Image: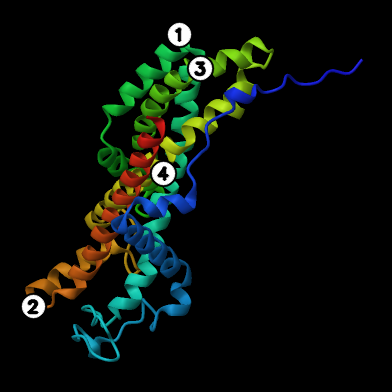
Amino acid sequence: MTTTAPAEPAVLRRRPGLRPLRLFAQGPLFTASVAVLAALVLTAVLAPVLAPYDPEAVDLAASLAGTTGEHLLGTDQSGRDILSRLMHGALTGLLGPLLVVGVSTLAGTLLGVVAAWRGGWADSFLSRSMDIAFAIPGLMLAILLVSVVGSGMTAPVIAMAVAYTPYVGRLVRGIARQEKARPYIESYRVQGWSGWTVCLRHLLPNIAPTVFAQSAMSFGYALMDLAALSYLGFGVQPPTADWGAMINEGQSAVQQGAMLPALAPSACIVLAVVAFGIVGEGLADRIARRKR
């Protein structure tokens, strides 16, 4: 005797997700932000091809050279081409936040969904654990890990991922509890669908757009936090090109009247953070309008 899975009720199919082409109707500012982020990603990926110079090549004879045809953004104290270092720094500048957001989103989503779906002692335990994690400053945890592991990208990424996880977990728990209370969830359960099947096939896809929008905004904050750690000397170390470390190195140049070594990477960080914030807010607004 063969059995078939219960059919999905046509009227209770999950709501459609975000449609990429319609997102560009958010307005010119949203579209411009998406274009900026796309340009940053392409620059990071193609930096070895696009950069006019080796980002670590030292030329003391060209120290703090102004903008010229050979060096469009000038050079730093060591004569290294600033434009080339900005291009290569985009890779470290985006890779670190990508790891932070990816790990924290996966961990936070898992914790939040389990807490909302299971309820009871599991919800209480996970919620209290996330509250405790909230009390640990991410930057302090990063400094402690650097003192144990050593400077570089690994310790700051781990610390920031741990610090960001409870934020994602609390958000996911809230929206998952709201989604769980909707009639279609109980409808599937009555038809014989297992709890985890309903959760994986229907609840998670329905909360994914909101989580994605939050991740876009978190990406900008993670970029800023990791750049701050590099600026303080706890992140990526010279001579590796990194925007935060470049600002630190460019401070002494400012005292000599050369602004670009510090100003150029600062502008890149601000531009990226603002663009991610606008995209995240645009996605969140789109989701809010769709739910009304």
Rendered location of residue 65, percent (x, y): 20, 86
Residue, x 37% and y 46% (percent of image)? 216
Amino acid marked by disc 4:
Val
Q: Is residue 172 left or right of residue 228?
A: right
Residue beneath disc 3: 117
Mark 2: few, some, or many residues within 10 Å (few <14, many ≥20)?
few
Q: Do the numbered discs 2 and 1 sit on residues whose CB atoms are within 8 Å? A: no
Sequence-wise, which precedes: disc 2 or disc 3? Answer: 3
Rendered location of residue 291, percent (x, y): 40, 31
Q: Quadrant of residue 12?
A: top right
Amino acid marked by disc 3:
Trp
Q: Secondary structure at mark 1?
A: helix
What is the CA distance from the residue labelled 2 to the residue labelled 1? Answer: 61 Å
Q: Quadrant of residue 126?
A: top left
Sequence-wise, which precedes: disc 4 or disc 2? Answer: 4
What is the CA distance from the residue labelled 4 to the residue labelled 3? Answer: 23 Å
Q: Nearer the viewer, mark 2 or mark 3?
A: 3
The tag on residue 257 is 2
Front residue of this view, candidates 45 and 203: 203
Front residue of this view, candidates 259 and 202: 202
Mark 4: few, some, or many residues within 10 Å (few <14, many ≥20)?
many
Amino acid marked by disc 2:
Gly
Amino acid marked by disc 1:
Trp
Q: Secondary structure at mark 4?
A: helix
Q: Do the numbered discs 4 and 3 sit on residues whose CB atoms are within 8 Å? A: no
**Figure quadrant of the N terminus:** top right
The tag on residue 121 is 1
Q: Is residue 1 above or below residue 247?
A: above
Residue, x 26% and y 56% (percent of image)? 233
Sequence-wise, which precedes: disc 1 or disc 4? Answer: 4
Residue beneath disc 4: 101
